[in-house]
């Protein structure tokens, strides 16, 4: 089993614009760190100013829910990170997904989702979207010709996710985007894994980039937030209008936590990446492990697509344990881990492990055996390896 070597520096990703940003502190207070501005009410100097100010115009504030200097600054920095031009914040990654769906889809429309899409996105399609008369179908993210064949006149949005949730397949992004573009269908990428670092989605022609800022941009495991970034003013206005109608706001203190973490995102991402690749390479040699699912490894479906677009990878991978182990044995392995905690999410300092029942999720015969997903934190690789080693001994 071979893997491309982990990136040890963030040399192909420049955080400079996240540090040197045209933030203007109040007159006479030349601190480079951004202030935290809280507001529901914003006072207008007179009625004429109130009537003329427009929620679309970022130079004039109208109401706390429509933006403050703190949220506008975070939106600008996130757009800069991604090479986008406009961004809106949502109270969670899932709220950002809902925002995209509700801005882009109407009754009678159809949305296409990759079959390894983030589970709650699929659940939203099965419940809320269906109730609104919006249908969905699942496509294979490694089969761009299949997607092209599925697109119908009702298709108004194609979701993309790289790498896919849990099973980590890296999609044929270039050809999936080309297939949607050829039919004039908008694309939305859940770029939580790439974090704006692994590859540049707008350069590939993606229309909408959504993030769970909860993960790498926060890096602390203590904030829930999402973002939706575009390069197109008209598309942004459509999303911003839905954002306003839904009353989606984020707290200034939470926005400030993300602002504080962003300049270190490149360093953290590279550290998570290096440790994850070291552990994944070691796990691939273990007799208990049938398969390592990490996009930088040839054993992961879509590895060639990852290799073409990315140098970096997030600190996230899954292993398929040998099918001879029962689910109870696999659960006991996860319970025996000491440094890895059992919990959802990733991108924080603490490593996490979750066993998944793939048959319930995918019903896919290609994945026989039990899967465990590891989200690698910032602990030392040696300590994490020793922990997994002692827990694997419990499998026997
Ligand atoms: C975590 C996650 C989300 C949702 O983010 P929340 O802030 O937890 O709602 C969406 N997509 C992906 C790929 C995620 O990992």
Image (cartoon, rainbow, N blue to C red):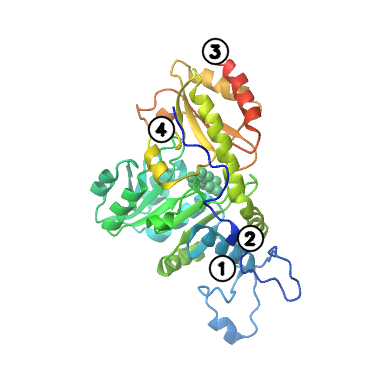
Graded by Cα atoms within 10 Å as few (under 14), some (14 to 19) or many (20 or more), the crowding at tag 4 reads some
Q: Nearer the viewer, residue 211 or 202?
A: 202
- Kindly state the secondary structure of the residue where label 4 is placed: loop
Q: Is residue 305 left or right of residue 353?
A: left
Q: In this view, does 326 lie above or below 95?
A: above
Question: What mark, if any, has residue 396 been given in the picture?
Answer: 3
Q: Which numbered disc flags the more N-terminal residue, 1 or 2?
A: 2
Q: Is residue 70 above or below residue 367?
A: below
Task: State the residue in front, 342 or 215.
Answer: 215
User: For the residue labelled by badge 2, is the local secondary structure a helix, a strand or a loop?
Assistant: helix
Gap between marks 3 and 4 measured at Cα: 27 Å
Q: Nearer the viewer, mark 1 or mark 2?
A: 2
- Whether residue 231 is visible to the viewer of this picture, yes or no, is yes
Picture quadrant where residue 204 is located: bottom left
Q: Mark 4 points at which residue?
A: 298
**Residue lying at 76% horizontally and 75% vertically, measured from the top left:** 28
Q: Which of marks 1 and 4 is nearer the N terminus?
A: 1
Q: Nearest to the eye among marks 1 and 4: give it.
A: 4
Disc 1/disc 2 C-alpha distance (Å): 25 Å
Q: Where is residue 333 in the image (x, y as percent from the top left)?
A: 57, 21
Task: Please name which of the two marks, 1 or 3, marks the residue nearer to the observer.
Answer: 3
Q: How far apart are marks 1 and 3 (CA)?
A: 57 Å
Using the image, tell me which numbered label, if any, was put on residue 19. Answer: 2
Of the image marks 2 and 4, the number of the one nearer the N terminus? 2
Q: Do the residues labelled 1 and 2 touch (CB within 8 Å)?
A: no
Mark 3–mark 4 CB contact (< 8 Å): no
| Residue assigned mark 1 | 66
């Amino acid at each position: 089993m071979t893997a491309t070597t982990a990136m040890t520096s963030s040399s192909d990703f420049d955080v400079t614009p996240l540090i040197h940003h045209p933030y203007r502190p109040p007159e006479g207070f030349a601190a480079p760190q951004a202030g935290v501005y809280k507001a529901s009410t914003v006072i207008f100097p007179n009625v004429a100013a109130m009537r003329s100010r427009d929620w679309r115009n970022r130079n004039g504030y109208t109401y706390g829910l429509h933006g403050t200097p703190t949220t506008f600054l975070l939106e600008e920095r996130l757009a800069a990170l991604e090479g986008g031009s406009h961004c809106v914040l949502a109270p969670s990654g899932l709220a950002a997904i809902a925002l995209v769906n509700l801005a882009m889809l109407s009754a009678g429309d159809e949305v296409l989702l990759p079959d390894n899409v983030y589970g709650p996105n699929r659940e939203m399609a099965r419940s809320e979207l269906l109730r609104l008369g919006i249908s969905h179908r699942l496509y294979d993210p490694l089969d761009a010709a299949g997607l092209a064949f599925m697109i119908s006149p009702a298709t108004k949005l194609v979701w993309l996710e790289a790498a896919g949730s849990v099973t980590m397949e890296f999609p044929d992004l270039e050809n999936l985007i080309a297939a949607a573009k050829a039919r004039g269908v908008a694309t939305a990428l859940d770029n939580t894994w790439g974090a704006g670092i692994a590859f540049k989605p707008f350069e590939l022609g993606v229309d909408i980039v959504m993030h769970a800022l909860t993960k790498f941009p926060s890096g602390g495991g203590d904030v829930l937030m999402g973002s939706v970034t575009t390069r197109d003013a008209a598309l942004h206005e459509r999303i911003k209008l839905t954002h306003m109608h839904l009353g989606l706001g984020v707290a200034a203190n939470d926005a400030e936590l993300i602002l504080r973490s962003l300049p270190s995102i490149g360093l953290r991402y590279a550290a998570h990446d290096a440790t994850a690749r070291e552990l994944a390479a070691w796990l691939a040699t273990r007799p208990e492990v049938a398969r390592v699912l990490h996009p930088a490894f040839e054993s992961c479906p879509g590895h060639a697509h990852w290799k073409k677009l990315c140098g970096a990878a997030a600190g996230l991978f899954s292993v398929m344990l040998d099918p001879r182990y029962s689910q109870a044995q696999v659960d006991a392995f996860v319970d025996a881990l000491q440094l890895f905690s059992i919990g959802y999410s990733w991108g924080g300092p603490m490593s996490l492990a979750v066993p998944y029942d793939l048959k319930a999720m995918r019903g896919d015969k290609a994945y026989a055996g039990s899967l465990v997903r590891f989200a690698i934190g910032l602990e030392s690789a040696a300590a994490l390896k020793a922990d997994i080693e002692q827990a694997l001994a419990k499998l026997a």
